[in-house]
Image (tube, helix red, strand yellow):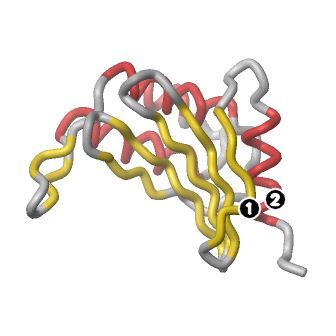
Amino acid sequence: MQLEKMAAADNPPWLHSALSQLRDLENHGRDVPGIGDLRISNQTASRARLALSVVNVIDLPAPVVSPVSGGSVSIIWSLGEKEVKFAFYSDGGSMYFTSADDEVVDEGPVNFAEPGIAAAALQWMLQPIR
């Protein structure tokens, strides 16, 4: 029920996809050949949900939500040659990375008290490459 409330009609269109992927990973994990079943912890999923809920950028493509070994998760938005990745680690840390043409442009900690940082990274992705 909480998923439906967060993905209400007045929220960005990509949010439902992101929350659904996150819920599936939290509940079922993902079997990766040669590595095993990757599951994300409840705490990591909660931090990722919180981050998704404060992103106020509407015109984004749906992100790809992927498990990382050790109970971590990454959320990646891609548009052309640009990419914005948010990584939520099982130890409680969170980072964002922006890249263009496979080179890191910017990185830093995700600070939930300053959601504008995440929005700025995603707005950067939407700007044309000059």
Look at 45% across and 57% down and name the residue there: 64
Q: What element carries label 1?
A: strand
Answer with mark 2 or mark 1, whichever residue precedes in sequence.
Answer: 1
Give the camera-side residue of 45 and 72.
72
User: How far apart in space, not on screen, are marks 2 and 1 (Cα)?
Assistant: 11 Å
Mark 2 vs mark 1: in front: 1
Q: Is residue 15 above or below residue 84?
A: above
Query: Residue 124: x percent and y percent?
Result: 81, 59
| Residue 80 rendering spot, x and y as whole percentages | 66, 79
Q: Is 76 situated left or right of 125 in this image?
A: left
Horizontal and vertical percent position of residue 40: 28, 34
Towards the viewer: 60 or 79: 79
Q: Report x, y in % for residue 100.
A: 69, 72
Residue 124, numbered circle? 2
Looking at the picture, which amino acid does disc 2 mark? Trp
At mark 2, the secondary structure is: helix
Residue type highlighted by circle 1: Val
Residue at (56, 25) in percent of width and height: 50
Residue 10 appears anywhere in the view: no
Point out the image quarter for the N terminus: top left
Is 17 on the left or on the right of 14, as rendered?
left
Residue that carries the numbered disc 1 in the rendered image: 105
Can residue 52 be seen from the camera position used here?
yes
